[in-house]
């Protein structure tokens, strides 16, 4: 594993109000290279708002988020030019949406979805693009002969895997994931989790993972932040937060899991 | 012999907020030192806090006060106040833990479950798998099972996979929570040898051994723990 001595993401006092309503409030943390941080909490607790602020898709009311970019050095994602932000979102950052249809273009083939991202970073040679696209289909366990099929002919689990491939094909360093296994049946979820776990550790990705599923968090995340009503009520090492939760809300969450 | 673990004035309580704020005192003012090459067996009745102490040493439980100094990379680091990142680094390089039960991950083979800690440490797949295979063989797991996920294995087989995983990296500090609980005599003997080899290599070991025969074979001294309820 890589051991750099600078955080990849530095978030300071990130706060978002929707009018008088709190989206998320005063969230600060550092994320290090190769580290996976889970954000857990019930729906409406501000997880997705925070994720959108962190990935630069939503401007916070106050606070700052900076990335350590290979190309641009330290970038404040809410105080940089649109050009830089767009370039980052195509290259060094990836966003995996809960609904794969939000991250894919359904009107073009799987190969074109993959190729488009490559072309947006300057790839032009058709043969190379197609070869790379086929390789990434393989990485996410989709048959290479589906390359010319439209994603709408794919099952939900396949679409989700394609969306992940579309993000990873340009070798991002930070990936934001919003409920990547939500709505999938358990066997597909197990396969996707296994895939994510391997890719994350092999590629040394930094990941921020929003999930309400504590088992998913335990499997993938090194550390957790627990959110309630927009605020982080507890954070720490994943197994410590889940096995010895300190905050009443975390205890309630952990004690509410059904034993299969 | 150098001190590898130094616990001082450690307090652990659980506050159950969902149960009306009930407070359970586990241990208070606990002091313990463990040196290189030494095995300390935690003794005491069920509920005396033995597993809670092991979990606290591993950073899995969060003590209320006191310190747990761990010799990591030449310096003493306090597990109670260390950041998650430091604790993960300590677990990767310095401190291994064999829990009572294997946590199985869907689709991951027994061989890879065992190889994972060494792979995370050195990134060498072949070396990690070779080491994993030699441990599984020593612990009498038939090679036909190596490529299967351990979810369907028997309790004893899962425990042996878990032990192999714990010994895959030659950790300077080892925490063992009833490693021989559901093993037959032959496999118990293998575990005893593994522990004694680790000690000879300089590891500091803290363990819970209900099997007195095993305890006598591996431990250098007992650390008695008393239930807080008794003491009060």
Image (cartoon, coloured by chain):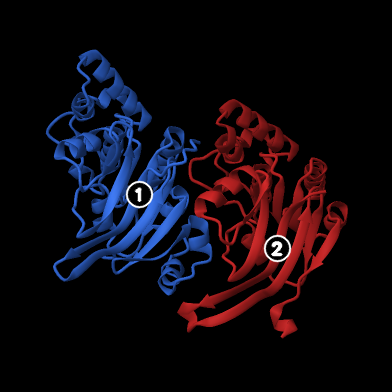
In this orientation, does residue A190 appear?
A: yes
* Disc 1: which residue: A10
* Disc 2: which residue: B7
Q: Which residue is drawn at 18% across and 44% down?
A: A102
Q: Residue at x 30, y 21 (%)?
A: A132
Same chain? Circles 2 and 1: no
Task: Tell me, for residue B58, which label it has, or none.
Answer: none
List x then y, in percent, for residue B170: 70, 40
Q: Assign a secondary structure to mark 2.
A: strand
The chain coloured red is B
Query: Please, is residue A171 above or below residue B84 in the view?
Result: above
Q: Colour of chain A?
A: blue
- Residue in the foreground of this view, choosing between A92 and B69: B69
Query: Please, is residue A8 above or below residue B230 in the view?
Result: above
Characterize the local packing of mark 2: few (<14), some (14-19) or many (20 or more) Cα atoms within 10 angstroms.
Answer: some
Q: In this view, does B89 lie to the left or right of A31?
A: right
Q: Is residue A246 left or right of residue B137?
A: left
Characterize the local packing of mark 1: few (<14), some (14-19) or many (20 or more) Cα atoms within 10 angstroms.
Answer: some
């Amino acid at each position: 594993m890589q051991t750099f001595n600078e955080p990849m993401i530095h978030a300071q006092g990130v706060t978002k109000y929707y009018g008088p309503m709190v989206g998320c409030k005063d969230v600060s943390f550092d994320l290090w290279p190769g580290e996976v941080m889970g954000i857990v909490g019930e729906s409406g607790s501000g997880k997705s708002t925070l994720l959108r602020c962190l990935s630069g898709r939503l401007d916070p009311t106050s606070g700052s988020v900076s990335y350590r970019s290979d190309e641009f050095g330290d970038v404040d994602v809410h105080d940089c030019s649109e050009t830089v932000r767009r370039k980052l979102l195509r290259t060094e950052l990836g966003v995996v949406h809960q609904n794969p249809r939000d991250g894919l273009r359904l009107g073009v083939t799987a190969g074109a979805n993959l190729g488009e991202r490559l072309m947006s970073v300057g790839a032009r040679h058709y043969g190379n693009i197609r070869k790379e696209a086929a390789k990434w289909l393989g990485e996410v366990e989709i048959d290479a002969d589906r390359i010319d099929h439209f994603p709408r002919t794919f099952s939900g689990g396949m679409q989700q895997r394609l969306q992940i491939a579309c993000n990873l094909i340009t070798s991002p360093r930070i990936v934001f994931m919003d409920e990547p296994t939500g709505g999938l049946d358990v066997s597909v979820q197990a396969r996707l989790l296994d895939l994510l776990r391997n890719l994350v550790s092999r590629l040394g990705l930094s990941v921020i993972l929003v999930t309400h599923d504590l088992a998913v968090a335990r499997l993938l995340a090194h550390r957790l932040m627990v959110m309630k009503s927009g605020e982080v009520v507890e954070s720490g090492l994943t197994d410590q937060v889940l096995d010895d939760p300190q905050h009443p809300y975390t205890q309630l969450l952990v004690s509410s899991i059904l034993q299969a | 012999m150098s001190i590898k673990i130094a616990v001082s004035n450690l307090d652990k309580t659980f506050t159950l907020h969902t149960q009306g704020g009930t407070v359970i005192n586990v241990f208070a003012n606990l002091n313990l030192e463990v040196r290189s090459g030494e095995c300390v067996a935690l003794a005491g009745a069920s509920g005396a806090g033995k597993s809670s102490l092991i979990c606290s040493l591993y950073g899995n439980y969060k003590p209320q006060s006191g310190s747990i100094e761990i010799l990591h990379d030449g310096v003493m680091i306090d597990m109670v106040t260390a950041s998650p990142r430091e604790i993960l680094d300590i677990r990767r390089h310095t401190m291994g833990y064999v829990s009572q039960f294997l946590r199985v991950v869907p689709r991951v083979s027994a061989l890879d479950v065992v190889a994972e800690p060494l792979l995370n440490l050195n990134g060498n797949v072949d070396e990690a798998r070779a080491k994993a295979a030699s441990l599984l063989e020593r612990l009498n797991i038939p090679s036909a099972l190596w490529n299967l996920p351990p979810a369907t294995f028997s309790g004893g087989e899962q425990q042996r996979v878990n032990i192999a995983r714990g010994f895959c990296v030659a950790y300077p500090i080892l925490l063992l929570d009833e490693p021989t609980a559901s093993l037959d005599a032959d496999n118990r003997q293998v575990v005893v040898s593994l522990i004694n080899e680790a000690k000879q290599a300089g590891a500091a070991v803290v363990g819970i051994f209900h099997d007195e025969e095993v305890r006598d074979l591996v431990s250098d001294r007992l650390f008695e723990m008393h239930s807080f309820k008794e003491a009060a």
